[in-house]
Image: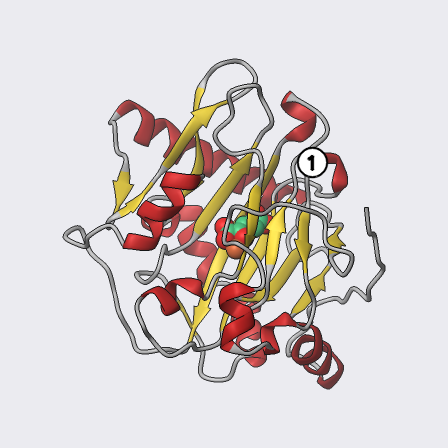
Amino acid sequence: MTVKFYKKFTLGGEITEEQKRFFDEFGFIHFEKFIDEQAVSELIHSTEAVQANWVSNNINQVNGVPIKFGFDEDGKKIVQRFSFTNLFSPEIKNLLGDERLQVIKGLLPGARIGELEKDGVVVNHYVNVPNSNYKQLGWHTDSARDIFYGKKIHPMLNAGIYLDDSSEENGGLRILPGTHKQNIFSMLFRKAYFLSNNDDKDEILVRAKKGDLVIHDGRMWHRVGQSPHFGARSRRRVIYVPFLVDRYQPKDANSKTPFYLKFQKLIG
Ligand SMILES: O=C(O)CCC(=O)C(=O)O
Ligand SMILES: [Fe+2]
């Protein structure tokens, strides 16, 4: 497996020239220690409360976006992909107002946080158990959905806040740096969306600690590997906050399930 090293940063009161250059060139940037352990625990507890609510009330979609359920190592029903957590978790809603999160807009001028758009604030929970629904995620770009709708591709950022340490031990995010600058053909056909999960000689493994913030451009190819371990050792939870610049398209309770999510469900 390819492990390449890259420079990590600390987020200050504004995005520096160097950080902007790094992000523009590679399509991602890693800020260490964005939130502390206490904040991480509070966020974990909060997602667990949302999970308990959705499981006991049989809520299986929010604003047309399906919730992905699965089971943990104890056989307990869990949520593996949450959408619009900002509408259910006061802690996550609060996080969106954090001044430091606004600083990220310096990477994408004119950006807004997609509180009611796309899938809202997503939380991913991967765990490798024999019947897991979610132990890896194949190669994709987050911008592909725009292509499905015949829309112009706009840049978007996905800001990932880590709730667990993440490396090859629990799968880890693998990215192809620089592919955010690819042409539309490569964005469509470089790999088979979600079906392919093979190592790529050019991929970089993101090694993050809980509390880190890793931002990627939605046009870049990325995947999440499968942990070689089972159960608790394979657990990986990340919160994703979307930063958008395209036309404002809020969703609500009447929103239909987008076709690309039905497709993803079919193959994933
Ligand atoms: O879990 C991750 O770090 C990446 C998830 C992802 O790429 C996605 O949900 O689109
Ligand atoms: Fe993604």
In the picture provided, is 146 more to the left or to the right than 243?
left
Count of numbered circles on the image: 1
Nearest the viewer among 77 and 189 is 189
At 81% from the left and 46% from the top, the residue drawn is 1
* Residue 156 rendering spot, x and y as whole percentages: 48, 71
**In the image, farthest residue toward the left:** 254
Judge left or right: residue 111 versus residue 10: left
Q: Is residue 238 above or below residue 5?
A: above
Residue 256, relative to residue 96: is it above or below? Answer: above
Image point 76% across, 67% down: which residue? 9
Q: Position of residue 59 (x, y in %)?
A: 26, 33
Q: Nearer the viewer, residue 15 or 235?
A: 235
- Ligand 1 has an atom within 8 Å of the beta carbon of the residue at disc 1: no
Secondary structure of the residue carrying tag 1 is: helix
**Quarter of the rendering containing residue 29:** bottom right
* Coloration mode: secondary structure
Label 1 Cα neighbours within 10 Å, binned few <14 / some 14-19 / many ≥20? many
> Residue 212: in sight, yes or no?
no
Residue in the foreground of this view, choosing between 63 and 189: 189
Q: Tell me which amino acid carries mark 1.
A: Asn
Give the residue number, with chain letter if any, for mark 1: 170
The C terminus lies in which quarter of the figure?
A: top left
Q: Look at 68% across and 53% down and name the residue there.
A: 174
Tell me residue 201's x, y (percent).
78, 56
